[in-house]
């Protein structure tokens, strides 16, 4: 099964194995935890060009994104097991547009549309981060 937005280009940057990308592309919700946080928080993720991204709905000082800003190392949980990750902010209007499109395609149910539209807001768009494997 080919992932939406997957690229055949290879790069020197760290990448998740294709089986992980496939699972993340299909997962409707994913748990994330930064550093020593005591719990996983559920978020929506998208895969674009073989890379994993997320946006924060409310960028609170006590939220998951703030925790990753303080400590970019953490974990994502899929298939009931934690996977070590690191994060970095996302820049580039073209990539941010592709991420927005991926959210609209993946979360297309009537109940999801309100939230996807909300992710277009400049403040939320600016919260986009990328998850990378940490080895």
Image: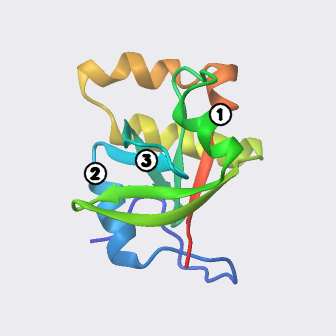
**Marks 3 and 2 in Cβ contact (< 8 Å):** no
- Name the one closer to the observer, 8 or 129: 129
Task: Tell me what residue is drawn at x 60 percent, y 21 percent.
Answer: 60
Q: Label 2: how many residues lie within 10 Å, few (<14), some (14-19) or many (20+)?
A: some
Q: Position of residue 70 (x, y in %)?
A: 70, 43
Residue 32 is marked as: 3
Residue 127 is marked as: 1
- Name the one closer to the observer, 86 or 122: 86
Q: Label 3: how many residues lie within 10 Å, few (<14), some (14-19) or many (20+)?
A: many
Residue 114 falls in image quadrant: top left
Mark 3, secondary structure of its residue: strand
* Left or right, 118 with reference to 104: right
Q: Which residue is mark 2?
A: 27
Nearest to N terminus: mark 3 or mark 2: 2
Q: Position of residue 84 (x, y in %)?
A: 48, 66
Nearest to N terminus: mark 2 or mark 1: 2
């Amino acid at each position: 099964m080919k992932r939406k937005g997957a690229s055949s280009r290879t790069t020197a940057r760290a990448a998740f194995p294709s089986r992980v990308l496939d699972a993340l592309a299909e997962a409707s919700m994913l748990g994330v935890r930064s550093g020593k946080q005591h719990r996983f928080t559920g978020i929506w993720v998208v895969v674009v060009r073989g890379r994993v991204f997320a946006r924060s709905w409310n960028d609170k000082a006590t939220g998951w994104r703030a925790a990753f800003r303080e400590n970019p190392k953490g974990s994502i949980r899929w298939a009931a097991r934690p996977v070590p990750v690191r994060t970095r902010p996302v820049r580039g209007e073209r990539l941010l547009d592709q991420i927005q499109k991926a959210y609209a395609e993946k979360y297309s149910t009537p109940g999801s549309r309100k939230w996807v539209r909300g992710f277009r807001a400049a403040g939320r768009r600016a919260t986009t981060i990328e998850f990378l494997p940490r080895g």
